[in-house]
Amino acid sequence: MTDSNNRPVSPVNGQPLPRGKPFTSETAREAGRKGGRKAGINIKKRKTLREELLAVLTDMEIPEKNSEKKVPVQEALSVSLIKAALNGNVRAFEIIRDTIGEKPVENVVASLQDGGDFVLTITGDADAQD
């Protein structure tokens, strides 16, 4: 198969094939192998956001306001979060409460058709959106 410029096209999607080697199962396998290797390298290079945040929280220090003293980022964030909660920020309060393990458990009672009761415990974040 060729396009209007007489270039070979892929039998799968009709897109022009790269110049050079003809498109065969062998060249496709080789290209897939190269792509898989590069993806693996990139995954190893890139830290997960969680790992990166944990490293910054524990290792980095920032100057304290109105002082020459440096404090760990985690401590500065904790103080800032507590100040926000004390100023009436309900979300900040909820984050603190949930982080220290005092998040309330939601219980839902439902009845079966035969009259038996069961308790359904929902442990996820009720505010989470998909």
Image (cartoon, rainbow, N blue to C red):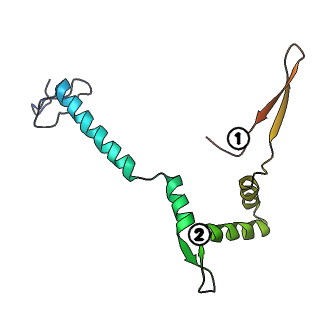
- Say how many tags the image has: 2
* Horizontal and vertical percent position of residue 107: 83, 36
Is any atom of residue 54 visible in this view? yes
Q: Quadrant of residue 115?
A: top right
Per the image, the residue denoted by label 2 is 73
Density class for disc 2 (Cα within 10 Å; few <14, some 14-19, many ≥20) is: some
The front one of 11 and 90 is 90
Mark closest to the chain's N terminus, 1 or 2? 2
* Horizontal and vertical percent position of residue 12: 26, 24
Q: Is residue 51 above or below residue 122?
A: below
Q: Residue at x 70, y 44 (%)?
A: 125
Instruction: State which mark lies toward you, 1 or 2.
Output: 2
Residue furthest front as drawn: 59
The front one of 35 and 40 is 40
Q: Quadrant of residue 77?
A: bottom right
Left or right of 93? Residue 3 is: left
* Horizontal and vertical percent position of residue 10: 20, 27
Query: Which quarter of the rendering shows the N terminus?
Result: top left
Per the image, the residue denoted by label 1 is 124
The circle on residue 76 is: none
Q: Residue at x 70, y 41 (%)?
A: 124
Under circle 2, the secondary element is helix
Under circle 1, the secondary element is loop
Q: Residue at x 79, y 51 (%)?
A: 102
Rounded to the nearest whole Å, what is the CA distance between mark 1 and mark 2? 28 Å
* Horizontal and vertical percent position of residue 2: 13, 27
